Amino acid sequence: MNRVLFWTPRVVGILFTAFVSLFAFDVFAEGYGFWEAILALLIHLVPTGLLLITLAIAWRYERLGGMLFIALGIFYVVAFWGRVEWPGYLLIAGPAILTGLLFWLAGWYRARAINEARGFKR
C-alpha cells in the first residue's frame, strides 16, 4: 500500500500534465508564421509549466503540492466559469483536484507512519 500511495499521485500528475500540454499544439492549425507559432506555443505551454512546477513541489512536499493542485483546479473553475461546458470543468479541474487529493493523502499517510514509528499516537 505504501508504494501505491507514493506512486499513484505522481503518475497521475505526470499523465495529467502531458494531457494538458497536448492542447498547446493546436496553435499549429491556426496558420501562423514560424515565429508567431513558436510564440503562441510558448504562451499555450504556460499551464503546463505551472503544472510541472506544482508537480516538482508535490514530489518533495506532498501535502503542500496536493493543496497547490487543488488550488489550480479550483482556479480553473473560477477563471473560466461560464466559458466552457461542464465536461470541460471535469476534464481539467477534475484530474487536478484528484491529483491534489492523492498527494495530500500520501503526505498524510507518510506523516502518520513517521509519527507512529517515533512512538507518537493520536
Image (cartoon, helix red, strand yellow):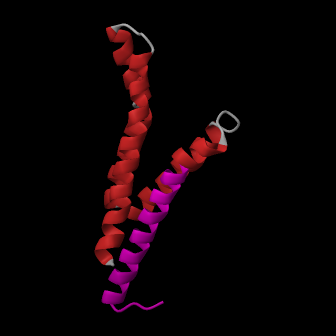
Number of numbered discs overlaid on the protein picture: 0
One can see residue 58 in this view: no
Describe residue 97's horizontal placement relative to residue 60 as left or right. right
Residue drawn at (31%, 77%), measured in percent from left and top?
2
**18 or 78: nearer the viewer:** 18
Tell me the chief SS of the magenta region. Answer: helix
Quadrant housing residue 87: top right
Residue drawn at (53%, 46%), measured in percent from left and top?
91
The magenta segment is 93-122
Magenta-span inclusion, residue 115: yes
Quadrant housing residue 51: top left
Q: Position of residue 42 (x, y in %)?
A: 37, 24
Say above or below: 21 vs 55. above
One can see residue 49 in this view: yes
Image quadrant for the N terminus?
bottom left
**114 or 86: nearer the viewer:** 86
Q: Position of residue 110 (x, y in %)?
A: 36, 75
Residue drawn at (59%, 41%), measured in percent from left and top?
88
Q: Residue furthest top?
A: 33
**53 or 82: nearer the viewer:** 82
Quadrant housing residue 61: bottom left
Q: Residue furthest right?
A: 82
Residue drawn at (39%, 35%), measured in percent from left and top?
22
Say above or below: 80 vs 91. above
Magenta-span inclusion, residue 118: yes
Q: Position of residue 67 (x, y in %)?
A: 49, 58
Say above or below: 14 vs 41. below
Q: Position of residue 8 (x, y in %)?
A: 35, 64
